Image (cartoon, rainbow, N blue to C red):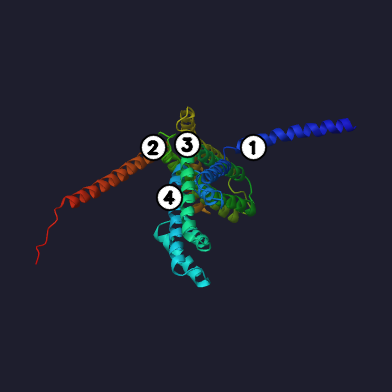
Amino acid sequence: MSARRANGNRQKVLEVVPRRLRELAQRRHQPVVVQTVRSAAAATIAYATAVWLLSAQPPPLLAPLTALLVVQVTLYATLTSGIRRVNAVVAGVLIAVAFSEMVGLSWWSLGLLIISALVLGHLVRAGEFVPEVAISAMLVLGVSHSTDLALSRVLETLVGAVVGLLFNTVFVPPVWVETAGDSIEDLARRMRTLMLDLADQVGGRIPVEQAAARLHTARRLDHDVVQVDASLARAEESLRFNPRVKEALLSRIVLRTGLDTLEICAVVLRVATRTLTDLAKHRTDEDLFPPEIATALRELLMHTAGAVESFAVLITTQVSRNAEEAETFLLTELSASRASRDHLARLLLEAVREDPRQWQLHGALLAEVDRMLDELDVEKRSLRLAEELDRYSRERRGRRLLSDGRLRRLRRVRRRPRVRRPNR
């Protein structure tokens, strides 16, 4: 009996451990996990470097702290935050040295120091590191030998910033395009699931509470879009200054325009669920649609759901061999959706002629479907990509011309001869 129990427990352990290992292996590519490992490694290297270059007494903790804040998820964020970080600490040290020489440390000088440090942080454009100006100033002002401490803090900050920048330069952060693509596909799958649920509801009598629940689900898509937008913003930032990426502009524009399309479709889908909810409120004692119209609407929603999902697959597999297959499937679903839409329009027209109740809701439902199919159209997507590329080229050309104009004016001023005033 005990042997069986032991074998059973051993089997359970063997089943649990591989599952947890698989989950850990899947999470190793998540931004949070990657950033945690990279930050810890950079901070440790910065501390060891500061101890070797400077001194271990007192412990140079500002170096690992600086490296911890400098090493960001993307190389672009590392470069920009590193400059602002060093700028903030140096500004705090300098204002603390000035205060220690003039007034020393007291309750009123501390308050005045904090106000001055925060104002100085905004003046030097420290960004999110404005509080660090006041923190550095208070630490320096509260310790004796402020001049020596100021120099050591500046050196520690420089060591941490340099280590952080070199760490992200040698170990280039990953490109988060694939993660953003997975988020976009997940959003499209949620939209598809909602449309399939709506397709199952259109036949028969629908309680108002059930229709309202689908409306709340559609409203939650707005929160999902915000999360996907944040993931895409991180992916766009990871493409900047990254030597691993060759066609960063095209990838960024394809994903951004694709997310814009899905966001519009999510809004239209929410409006469509509101229309169905209003119909359910007016038709509590009867079926939402006659059987023939319900079948046509169900087919339309199913084809549109497939088009949304295939559109997401298309924009996230631009450089793979599956792109052509996804585009073919999208064209097929859009063609079937338009055919189902025309058939549904004829049926609704005949039904309205017989019974004109809530005719405006029928028209609104067709208009919402038309808007969604128009946004998913392949030709419109190609035109939108071309417009975005042209706009970016014009903006880049304009910035170049502006820079050249400023350079020419500066050279003209330098070449202008100075007029000597005669001595009186």
The residue to which callout 2 is attached is: 382
Does residue 202 appear to the left or right of 352 in the view shown?
Answer: right
Q: Amino acid at mark 4?
A: Ile
N-terminal of the pair, mark 3 or mark 4, is 4
Q: Residue at x 26, y 48 (%)?
A: 402
Is there CB contact under 8 Å for labels 4 and 2? no
Q: Is residue 249 visible?
A: yes
**Label whose residue precedes the other's in the sequence (4 or 1):** 1
SS label for mark 4 = helix
Q: Which residue is mark 4?
A: 83
Q: Position of residue 97 (x, y in %)?
A: 45, 62
Residue 16 picture location, percent across and down: 73, 35
- Percent across and percent down for residue 157 are 48, 51
- Label 2, label 1: how far apart the Cα atoms are: 40 Å
Q: Decide: marks 3, 4 in contact (CB < 8 A)? A: no
Q: In the rendered structure, which disc, 3 or 1, sits on the residue that comes first in sequence? A: 1
The residue wearing badge 1 is 24
Q: Give the distance between the C-alpha atoms of the residues marked 2 and 3, in whole angstroms.
A: 38 Å
What's the residue type where badge 2 is placed? Ser
User: 55 or 212: which is nearer to us?
Assistant: 55
Badge 1 marks a residue whose secondary structure is helix
- The quarter in which the N terminus is drawn is top right
Closer to us: mark 3 or mark 1?
3
Q: Which residue is mark 3?
A: 170
Task: Say what amino acid the circle numbered 3 marks.
Answer: Val
